[in-house]
Image: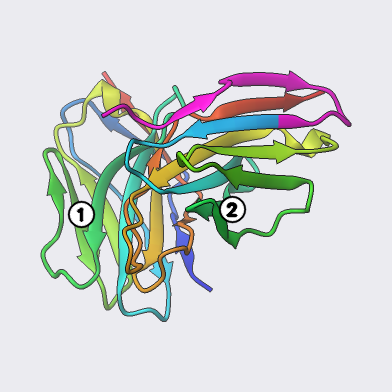
Amino acid sequence: KAGVTQTPRYLIKTRGQQVTLSCSPISGHRSVSWYQQTPGQGLQFLFEYFSETQRNKGNFPGRFSGRQFSNSRSEMNVSTLELGDSALYLCASSLSPSGGGPDTQYFGPGTRLTVL
Amino acid sequence: AQTVTQSQPEMSVQEAETVTLSCTYDTSENNYYLFWYKQPPSRQMILVIRQEAYKQQNATENRFSVNFQKAAKSFSLKISDSQLGDTAMYFCAFIPRNSGNTPLVFGKGTRLSVIA
């Protein structure tokens, strides 16, 4: 099976702009989670989607949003970019079978966002 | 709240030698999963090994094995016969078992350098 894919791999934006990142999960995986990775804060959870519904959200401002489509692909959007949004954004997918219980998360290669 | 602590920011090991990376965690949960992920310079986060807390037997994957001490809340990773390709950041991560949408909690990571 193909792994988790993320596009684009690199982005350069300026303050105030908005950006959309895309994530395609492993075929058959229904849960998609997003994480932000920075040298100072490490890996921080943004949100998780399952069956087009946001099930959990981390402690990030409302400028960060996401959605999931019926084919499980997910997008995240950051509006009004700030310098501090420069980071590696990682997407992870998991089976998340019905009945609950966590499943192993498999990560994509990430999108490196630089805000100037 | 769950926390994961990796007390060794950096480590180095000679090629073909054995190295152990430490991880401790804090939780009131009884059932949970623990993971080690590897992030090489390419930035792709790769699953190394997974341990289920209700299983007493330590997980192994080829040259990688864990020492899981549930009472001590310790989860160390042993890499045998270290190879240059093992050079990477290693992250310990935790997730409780009884919630399908709880995010992974990561440690700050240990940077491992394998020296020829």
Residue where numbered disc 1 is placed: B66
Seen at 43% across and 75% down, the residue is B27
Find numbered disc 1 in the image and state the secondary structure of the residue it sits on: strand
Instruction: Say which quarter of the image contains residue B19.
Output: top left
Find numbered disc 2 in the image and state the secondary structure of the residue it sits on: strand
In the image, the segment drawn in magenta is A1-19
Give a yes or no on whether discs 1 and 2 share a subunit.
Answer: no
The chain containing the residue under callout 1 comes to B
Mark 1: amino acid: Val
Can you say whether B97 is above or below A58 in the image? below
Q: How many marks?
A: 2
Instruction: Say which quarter of the image contains residue B114.
Output: top left
The chain containing the residue under callout 2 comes to A
Mark 2: amino acid: Phe
Residue where numbered disc 2 is placed: A47
Residue B104: percent from the left, percent from the top?
Answer: 45, 57
The one nearer the camera, B61 or A90, is A90
Seen at 26% across and 18% down, the residue is B116
